[in-house]
Image (cartoon, rainbow, N blue to C red):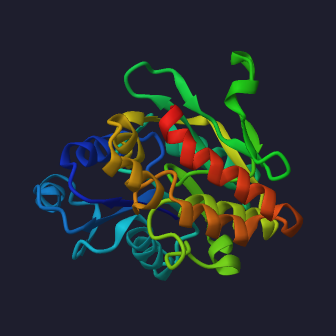
Amino acid sequence: MLYIIIPVFNRKKFTEECLLSLQKQTNTNFKIIVVDDGSTDGTSEMIDKNFSEVILIKAKGDLFWTAATNLGISYALNQHATFVMTLNNDTIATEDFVEKMYYWAAKKPDIIMGALALDAYTKEPVFGGERLNWLSNTNASVLANLSPEKQTGLHQVTHFPGRGLWIPRKVFEKIGLFDVKKFPHYFADYDFTYTATRAGFEIYCNFDAKIFIYPSESGDHQIRKKKTIKNYYNHLFGIKGGGNLANFTKFTLKNCPTPYIPLVLLNGYFRRIFGYIIK
């Protein structure tokens, strides 16, 4: 049985649309767990009223993404989940999303899979995974290097974000949950999947399984949207900052091959400190 874990904090409309898309799935062999981390906009009440099938876990508002996700995963594993999927509430699944995940899981039961992300407004593909090269300190986009006719099936990656991330139970049994101590919000999904890669698990983007996303709704995008001194500080040091220097440092020290660490850190600091201003 698949358990889908959705951590939420406010943004009731996004959560509602996400849950409605899951109600329309062609394969319904799954259960949904929503971890509501202290929403004040009526999210829990909406779920109680309109989505009785959802398992609702209420928290106090101090968890952030990683702890909320781990709470849902722990519940699922205690219920003997065979597979777990992490899913953001600002996503909309296509009707055959779960079906296409199960299809490839039947062929490769031990792999981790992410979903192809499409822009909810333009309907165009925007993210299909990356391949991290430590030597050059670059992430090569899989999608950018595929012609349209090849954008199907599985394509191997080195890591993947947590939106629509399919994880077999045995991965948790081998490497544990997401690292909440080092990465309470950003980088936890990349760290988890890269740790899984180092532990011998293969990770793919499943181009047949699609979700719609809202790129402009991420916390980091909001920080970048308006260039101010405060937002620059939050970009580099805030818990929701995509350029958080502490997160980048911890991720590098934990996952990077030792000989490359000095160069990767120097290059990464330069990109994060000056990239915000340039972009």
Compared with 186, 14 (above or below) is above
Q: Going 36% across and 67% down the picture, which residue do you hit?
A: 64
Q: Going 40% across and 76% down the picture, which residue do you hit?
A: 71
Q: Quadrant of residue 146?
A: top right
The percent coordinates of residue 99 (x first, y second) are: 55, 43
The percent coordinates of residue 5 (x first, y second) are: 42, 62
Does the image show residue 67? Answer: yes
Total marks shown come to: 0
Going by the image, does 253 lie left or right of 210? right
Instruction: From the viewer's side, name the closer residue of 71 and 51.
Output: 71
The percent coordinates of residue 77 (x first, y second) are: 51, 77
Compared with 125, 26 (above or below) is below
Going by the image, does 7 lie left or right of 270? left
Instruction: From the viewer's side, name the closer residue of 198 and 28.
Output: 198
Going by the image, does 86 lie left or right of 101? left
Instruction: From the viewer's side, name the closer residue of 154 and 175.
Output: 175
Q: Going 48% across and 45% down the picture, which residue do you hit?
A: 27
Does the image show residue 151? Answer: no
The percent coordinates of residue 6 (x first, y second) are: 38, 59
Q: Going 45% across and 39% down the picture, which residue do you hit?
A: 26
Q: Quadrant of residue 25?
A: top left
Extreme residue toward the right, this view: 259
Compared with 180, 242 (above or below) is above
Instruction: From the viewer's side, name the closer residue of 42 and 260.
Output: 260
Compared with 162, 209 (above or below) is above
